[in-house]
Amino acid sequence: MSHTPHFLHELVGSMSQGADGNPTVAMVEAAFRHHGLHWRYINLEVSPADLGTAVKGAKAMGFRGFNCSLPHKVSVIAHLDGLGESAAVMGAVNCVVRREDRLIGENTDGKGFLKSLESLIDPRGRSVVLFGAGGAARAIAVELGLAGVRHITIVNRSERRGAELVSLLRDRLRLDARLVVWGGEYAVPEGTDVVINGTSIGLYDPDARLAIDLDTLRPGMVAADVVFNPVRTRFLTEAASRGCRPLDGLGMLVNQGIVGIQYWTGIDPDAGVMRRALESAMGV
Ligand code: NDP
Protein backbone atom coordinates (compact mmCIF):
# COMPACT_ATOMS: atom_id res chain seq x y z
CA MET A 1 0.00 0.00 0.00
CA SER A 2 1.27 3.46 -0.87
CA HIS A 3 2.07 5.76 2.03
CA THR A 4 1.10 8.79 -0.07
CA PRO A 5 -2.65 9.28 -0.53
CA HIS A 6 -3.15 10.58 -4.08
CA PHE A 7 -5.23 13.53 -2.92
CA LEU A 8 -2.42 15.00 -0.82
CA HIS A 9 -0.99 18.25 -2.23
CA GLU A 10 2.67 18.21 -3.18
CA LEU A 11 4.53 20.75 -1.06
CA VAL A 12 7.29 23.20 -1.81
CA GLY A 13 8.44 25.69 0.80
CA SER A 14 10.23 28.97 1.18
CA MET A 15 12.49 28.98 4.24
CA SER A 16 13.46 32.39 5.47
CA GLN A 17 13.58 34.43 8.60
CA GLY A 18 10.66 36.84 8.78
CA ALA A 19 8.71 35.09 6.03
CA ASP A 20 5.68 37.41 5.94
CA GLY A 21 4.65 39.20 2.77
CA ASN A 22 6.80 37.26 0.32
CA PRO A 23 5.40 38.20 -3.15
CA THR A 24 7.00 35.17 -4.79
CA VAL A 25 4.41 32.96 -3.05
CA ALA A 26 1.65 34.50 -5.20
CA MET A 27 3.82 34.06 -8.30
CA VAL A 28 4.60 30.37 -7.75
CA GLU A 29 1.07 29.49 -6.67
CA ALA A 30 -0.35 31.26 -9.75
CA ALA A 31 1.80 29.00 -11.92
CA PHE A 32 0.65 25.87 -10.04
CA ARG A 33 -2.99 26.91 -10.51
CA HIS A 34 -2.55 27.85 -14.16
CA HIS A 35 -1.04 24.45 -14.96
CA GLY A 36 -3.62 22.50 -12.93
CA LEU A 37 -1.06 21.25 -10.41
CA HIS A 38 -2.40 20.37 -6.96
CA TRP A 39 0.72 21.76 -5.37
CA ARG A 40 1.23 24.35 -2.64
CA TYR A 41 4.14 26.77 -2.08
CA ILE A 42 4.18 27.89 1.53
CA ASN A 43 6.11 30.35 3.65
CA LEU A 44 8.06 28.76 6.50
CA GLU A 45 9.67 31.02 9.04
CA VAL A 46 12.83 29.24 10.23
CA SER A 47 15.40 30.58 12.68
CA PRO A 48 19.09 29.83 12.00
CA ALA A 49 19.21 27.53 15.05
CA ASP A 50 16.34 25.42 13.69
CA LEU A 51 17.50 25.16 10.08
CA GLY A 52 18.88 21.60 10.29
CA THR A 53 15.73 20.31 11.96
CA ALA A 54 13.56 22.14 9.43
CA VAL A 55 15.41 20.57 6.48
CA LYS A 56 15.09 17.11 8.07
CA GLY A 57 11.38 17.79 8.59
CA ALA A 58 10.87 18.87 4.97
CA LYS A 59 12.58 15.66 3.84
CA ALA A 60 10.58 13.51 6.24
CA MET A 61 7.32 15.09 5.08
CA GLY A 62 8.14 14.48 1.42
CA PHE A 63 8.50 18.12 0.31
CA ARG A 64 9.51 18.30 -3.36
CA GLY A 65 11.91 21.06 -2.39
CA PHE A 66 12.14 24.59 -1.05
CA ASN A 67 13.67 27.97 -1.62
CA CYS A 68 15.83 29.50 1.04
CA SER A 69 16.78 33.11 1.46
CA LEU A 70 19.02 35.06 3.83
CA PRO A 71 20.37 34.08 6.32
CA HIS A 72 20.17 30.43 5.22
CA LYS A 73 21.80 30.44 1.77
CA VAL A 74 25.22 29.21 2.92
CA SER A 75 24.42 27.41 6.17
CA VAL A 76 21.81 25.18 4.48
CA ILE A 77 24.58 23.42 2.53
CA ALA A 78 25.70 21.43 5.60
CA HIS A 79 22.23 19.84 5.75
CA LEU A 80 21.95 18.77 2.08
CA ASP A 81 22.97 15.60 0.22
CA GLY A 82 24.67 17.32 -2.73
CA LEU A 83 25.03 20.48 -4.84
CA GLY A 84 24.43 21.46 -8.46
CA GLU A 85 27.35 22.82 -10.48
CA SER A 86 26.92 26.57 -10.02
CA ALA A 87 25.83 26.27 -6.37
CA ALA A 88 29.04 24.32 -5.69
CA VAL A 89 31.17 27.03 -7.33
CA MET A 90 29.51 29.96 -5.55
CA GLY A 91 29.01 28.18 -2.22
CA ALA A 92 25.41 29.40 -1.87
CA VAL A 93 22.03 27.73 -2.33
CA ASN A 94 18.65 29.40 -2.82
CA CYS A 95 16.71 26.42 -4.17
CA VAL A 96 16.63 22.84 -2.90
CA VAL A 97 15.30 20.05 -5.07
CA ARG A 98 14.38 16.52 -4.01
CA ARG A 99 15.86 14.12 -6.55
CA GLU A 100 14.81 10.57 -5.63
CA ASP A 101 15.54 10.56 -1.90
CA ARG A 102 18.33 13.15 -1.97
CA LEU A 103 18.05 16.89 -1.32
CA ILE A 104 20.22 18.74 -3.84
CA GLY A 105 21.09 22.44 -3.52
CA GLU A 106 20.90 24.64 -6.59
CA ASN A 107 21.24 28.36 -7.13
CA THR A 108 18.58 29.84 -9.37
CA ASP A 109 19.40 33.56 -8.90
CA GLY A 110 22.14 33.58 -11.52
CA LYS A 111 20.21 31.18 -13.76
CA GLY A 112 17.19 33.51 -13.59
CA PHE A 113 19.37 36.43 -14.59
CA LEU A 114 20.91 34.47 -17.45
CA LYS A 115 17.49 33.45 -18.79
CA SER A 116 16.44 37.12 -18.80
CA LEU A 117 19.67 38.18 -20.49
CA GLU A 118 19.31 35.51 -23.17
CA SER A 119 16.03 37.12 -24.23
CA LEU A 120 18.15 40.04 -25.51
CA ILE A 121 21.63 38.72 -26.25
CA ASP A 122 23.72 35.53 -26.44
CA PRO A 123 26.23 35.92 -23.57
CA ARG A 124 28.91 33.75 -25.18
CA GLY A 125 32.04 35.73 -26.01
CA ARG A 126 30.67 38.96 -24.51
CA SER A 127 32.38 41.55 -22.37
CA VAL A 128 30.54 42.40 -19.15
CA VAL A 129 30.78 45.09 -16.45
CA LEU A 130 29.16 44.02 -13.17
CA PHE A 131 28.68 46.42 -10.25
CA GLY A 132 28.69 44.60 -6.90
CA ALA A 133 30.20 41.53 -5.31
CA GLY A 134 27.48 40.46 -2.84
CA GLY A 135 25.22 37.41 -3.10
CA ALA A 136 23.32 38.46 -6.23
CA ALA A 137 26.41 39.65 -8.11
CA ARG A 138 28.29 36.48 -7.18
CA ALA A 139 25.48 34.28 -8.50
CA ILE A 140 25.29 36.27 -11.74
CA ALA A 141 29.06 36.31 -12.28
CA VAL A 142 29.40 32.54 -11.81
CA GLU A 143 26.49 31.78 -14.14
CA LEU A 144 27.85 34.18 -16.78
CA GLY A 145 31.23 32.45 -16.48
CA LEU A 146 29.66 29.03 -16.95
CA ALA A 147 27.72 30.40 -19.95
CA GLY A 148 30.96 31.43 -21.68
CA VAL A 149 31.33 35.21 -21.40
CA ARG A 150 34.75 36.38 -22.60
CA HIS A 151 35.60 38.97 -19.97
CA ILE A 152 34.07 40.34 -16.79
CA THR A 153 35.00 43.47 -14.85
CA ILE A 154 33.79 43.50 -11.24
CA VAL A 155 33.31 47.04 -9.95
CA ASN A 156 32.84 47.04 -6.18
CA ARG A 157 33.11 49.50 -3.30
CA SER A 158 34.75 47.04 -0.91
CA GLU A 159 38.07 45.81 -2.29
CA ARG A 160 38.04 42.66 -0.14
CA ARG A 161 34.68 41.38 -1.37
CA GLY A 162 35.44 42.34 -4.96
CA ALA A 163 38.84 40.59 -4.86
CA GLU A 164 37.28 37.43 -3.41
CA LEU A 165 34.82 37.25 -6.31
CA VAL A 166 37.49 37.90 -8.93
CA SER A 167 39.69 35.12 -7.44
CA LEU A 168 36.74 32.74 -7.49
CA LEU A 169 36.05 33.50 -11.17
CA ARG A 170 39.70 33.14 -12.14
CA ASP A 171 40.50 30.06 -10.05
CA ARG A 172 37.30 28.03 -10.39
CA LEU A 173 36.14 29.05 -13.87
CA ARG A 174 39.42 30.17 -15.52
CA LEU A 175 37.58 33.34 -16.49
CA ASP A 176 39.29 36.53 -17.64
CA ALA A 177 38.13 38.68 -14.70
CA ARG A 178 39.44 41.90 -13.18
CA LEU A 179 38.55 44.13 -10.27
CA VAL A 180 38.00 47.87 -10.23
CA VAL A 181 37.57 49.36 -6.77
CA TRP A 182 34.64 51.75 -7.12
CA GLY A 183 35.43 55.35 -6.26
CA GLY A 184 34.07 58.29 -8.24
CA GLU A 185 32.25 58.06 -11.55
CA TYR A 186 33.04 54.78 -13.29
CA ALA A 187 33.69 55.02 -17.03
CA VAL A 188 32.42 51.94 -18.88
CA PRO A 189 35.20 50.70 -21.22
CA GLU A 190 34.62 50.68 -24.97
CA GLY A 191 33.69 47.25 -26.28
CA THR A 192 31.48 46.45 -23.27
CA ASP A 193 28.33 44.56 -24.29
CA VAL A 194 26.46 44.27 -20.97
CA VAL A 195 26.43 46.55 -17.88
CA ILE A 196 24.75 45.16 -14.76
CA ASN A 197 23.81 46.77 -11.48
CA GLY A 198 24.25 43.82 -9.10
CA THR A 199 24.24 46.05 -5.97
CA SER A 200 21.31 47.02 -3.78
CA ILE A 201 21.62 50.67 -4.86
CA GLY A 202 18.14 51.82 -5.94
CA LEU A 203 16.17 49.33 -3.86
CA TYR A 204 13.03 51.15 -2.66
CA ASP A 205 14.71 54.42 -3.75
CA PRO A 206 13.86 55.63 -7.26
CA ASP A 207 16.25 58.59 -6.91
CA ALA A 208 19.36 56.60 -5.94
CA ARG A 209 21.98 56.70 -8.67
CA LEU A 210 24.97 54.56 -9.57
CA ALA A 211 28.22 56.49 -9.74
CA ILE A 212 28.71 55.90 -13.46
CA ASP A 213 29.73 58.21 -16.29
CA LEU A 214 26.55 58.17 -18.37
CA ASP A 215 28.41 59.39 -21.46
CA THR A 216 30.19 56.03 -21.58
CA LEU A 217 26.91 54.09 -21.93
CA ARG A 218 26.51 53.49 -25.65
CA PRO A 219 23.49 52.67 -27.84
CA GLY A 220 22.88 48.94 -28.16
CA MET A 221 24.54 47.98 -24.86
CA VAL A 222 22.38 45.88 -22.56
CA ALA A 223 21.78 47.61 -19.19
CA ALA A 224 20.45 45.24 -16.53
CA ASP A 225 19.43 45.79 -12.92
CA VAL A 226 18.93 43.22 -10.14
CA VAL A 227 16.78 45.67 -8.20
CA PHE A 228 13.11 44.86 -8.82
CA ASN A 229 11.40 47.48 -6.65
CA PRO A 230 11.03 49.99 -8.23
CA VAL A 231 10.84 48.01 -11.46
CA ARG A 232 12.23 50.91 -13.53
CA THR A 233 15.27 52.07 -11.54
CA ARG A 234 17.01 55.36 -12.20
CA PHE A 235 19.92 53.40 -13.72
CA LEU A 236 17.60 51.71 -16.24
CA THR A 237 15.85 54.97 -17.12
CA GLU A 238 19.13 56.80 -17.67
CA ALA A 239 20.64 53.91 -19.63
CA ALA A 240 17.54 53.67 -21.85
CA SER A 241 17.78 57.42 -22.55
CA ARG A 242 21.31 56.74 -23.90
CA GLY A 243 20.02 54.06 -26.27
CA CYS A 244 20.85 51.02 -24.09
CA ARG A 245 18.50 48.04 -24.01
CA PRO A 246 17.07 47.79 -20.45
CA LEU A 247 16.49 44.55 -18.53
CA ASP A 248 14.69 44.88 -15.21
CA GLY A 249 15.14 42.88 -12.00
CA LEU A 250 11.56 41.65 -12.05
CA GLY A 251 12.42 39.53 -15.10
CA MET A 252 15.26 37.93 -13.12
CA LEU A 253 12.91 37.23 -10.21
CA VAL A 254 10.29 35.66 -12.47
CA ASN A 255 12.92 33.58 -14.24
CA GLN A 256 14.47 32.27 -11.03
CA GLY A 257 10.93 31.18 -10.10
CA ILE A 258 10.55 29.48 -13.49
CA VAL A 259 13.81 27.56 -13.05
CA GLY A 260 12.72 26.43 -9.55
CA ILE A 261 9.34 25.21 -10.83
CA GLN A 262 11.07 23.39 -13.68
CA TYR A 263 13.33 21.64 -11.15
CA TRP A 264 10.52 20.70 -8.78
CA THR A 265 7.73 19.76 -11.19
CA GLY A 266 9.36 19.09 -14.57
CA ILE A 267 6.93 21.48 -16.32
CA ASP A 268 7.81 24.67 -18.17
CA PRO A 269 5.58 27.28 -16.49
CA ASP A 270 3.96 30.28 -18.20
CA ALA A 271 6.16 33.35 -17.63
CA GLY A 272 3.35 35.85 -18.35
CA VAL A 273 1.07 34.35 -15.71
CA MET A 274 3.89 34.47 -13.17
CA ARG A 275 4.95 38.03 -13.94
CA ARG A 276 1.38 39.32 -13.73
CA ALA A 277 0.84 37.56 -10.37
CA LEU A 278 4.10 39.00 -9.03
CA GLU A 279 3.26 42.53 -10.22
CA SER A 280 -0.16 42.31 -8.64
CA ALA A 281 1.27 41.01 -5.32
CA MET A 282 3.82 43.84 -5.32
CA GLY A 283 1.24 46.43 -6.36
CA VAL A 284 3.32 47.64 -9.34
P1 NDP B 1 24.50 41.92 -0.53
O1 NDP B 1 24.29 42.66 0.74
O2 NDP B 1 25.07 40.54 -0.51
O3 NDP B 1 25.45 42.81 -1.51
C1 NDP B 1 25.19 44.18 -1.71
C2 NDP B 1 26.14 44.73 -2.77
O4 NDP B 1 25.78 46.09 -3.01
C3 NDP B 1 27.60 44.74 -2.35
O5 NDP B 1 28.42 44.57 -3.49
C4 NDP B 1 27.76 46.17 -1.78
O6 NDP B 1 29.10 46.65 -1.87
C5 NDP B 1 26.91 46.94 -2.76
N1 NDP B 1 26.42 48.20 -2.22
C6 NDP B 1 25.37 48.40 -1.37
N2 NDP B 1 25.22 49.71 -1.10
C7 NDP B 1 26.19 50.36 -1.79
C8 NDP B 1 26.55 51.74 -1.93
N3 NDP B 1 25.87 52.71 -1.31
N4 NDP B 1 27.61 52.06 -2.73
C9 NDP B 1 28.29 51.08 -3.38
N5 NDP B 1 28.00 49.76 -3.28
C10 NDP B 1 26.96 49.40 -2.51
O7 NDP B 1 23.08 41.93 -1.25
P2 NDP B 1 22.55 40.92 -2.38
O8 NDP B 1 23.63 40.70 -3.37
O9 NDP B 1 21.92 39.74 -1.74
O10 NDP B 1 21.36 41.77 -3.03
C11 NDP B 1 21.64 42.89 -3.87
C12 NDP B 1 20.36 43.32 -4.56
O11 NDP B 1 19.91 42.29 -5.44
C13 NDP B 1 19.18 43.58 -3.60
O12 NDP B 1 18.55 44.79 -4.00
C14 NDP B 1 18.24 42.41 -3.83
O13 NDP B 1 16.90 42.76 -3.63
C15 NDP B 1 18.52 42.11 -5.31
N6 NDP B 1 18.21 40.74 -5.70
C16 NDP B 1 17.39 40.58 -6.78
C17 NDP B 1 17.06 39.34 -7.22
C18 NDP B 1 16.16 39.22 -8.39
O14 NDP B 1 15.70 38.09 -8.67
N7 NDP B 1 15.88 40.28 -9.11
C19 NDP B 1 17.57 38.12 -6.57
C20 NDP B 1 18.47 38.38 -5.46
C21 NDP B 1 18.76 39.66 -5.06
P3 NDP B 1 30.18 46.32 -0.70
O15 NDP B 1 30.69 44.93 -1.00
O16 NDP B 1 31.18 47.38 -0.90
O17 NDP B 1 29.44 46.41 0.61
Image: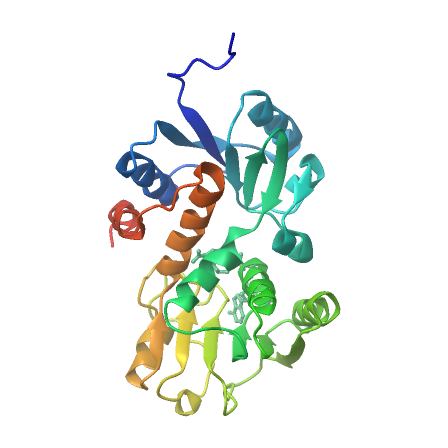
Between residues 236 and 126, which one lies in front from this camera angle?
126
Q: Is residue 185 left or right of residue 134?
A: left
Determine if residue 72 is in view.
Answer: no
Q: Residue at x 57, y 34 (%)?
A: 98
Query: How far across and down, in percent of the image, does residue 273 sit?
Result: 26, 47
Query: How far across and down, in percent of the image, does residue 78 sit?
Result: 71, 39
Q: Is residue 192 above or below residue 84?
A: below
Q: Is residue 141 left or right of residue 284?
A: right
Q: Residue at x 40, y 63 (%)?
A: 116
Query: How far across and down, in percent of the image, does residue 250 sit?
Result: 36, 58
Query: How far across and down, in percent of the image, does residue 235 sit?
Result: 38, 75
Toward the top, the furthest residue is 1
Q: Residue at x 64, y 53 (%)?
A: 85
Q: Give residue 170's quadrant in the image.
A: bottom right
Between residues 111 and 159, which one lies in front from this camera angle?
111
Q: Is residue 50 above or below residue 73?
A: above
Q: Count all numbered tags in the image, as a single digit.
A: 0
Quarter of the C terminus within the rendering: bottom left
Q: Residue at x 56, y 51 (%)?
A: 107
Q: Is residue 55 left or right of residue 243?
A: right
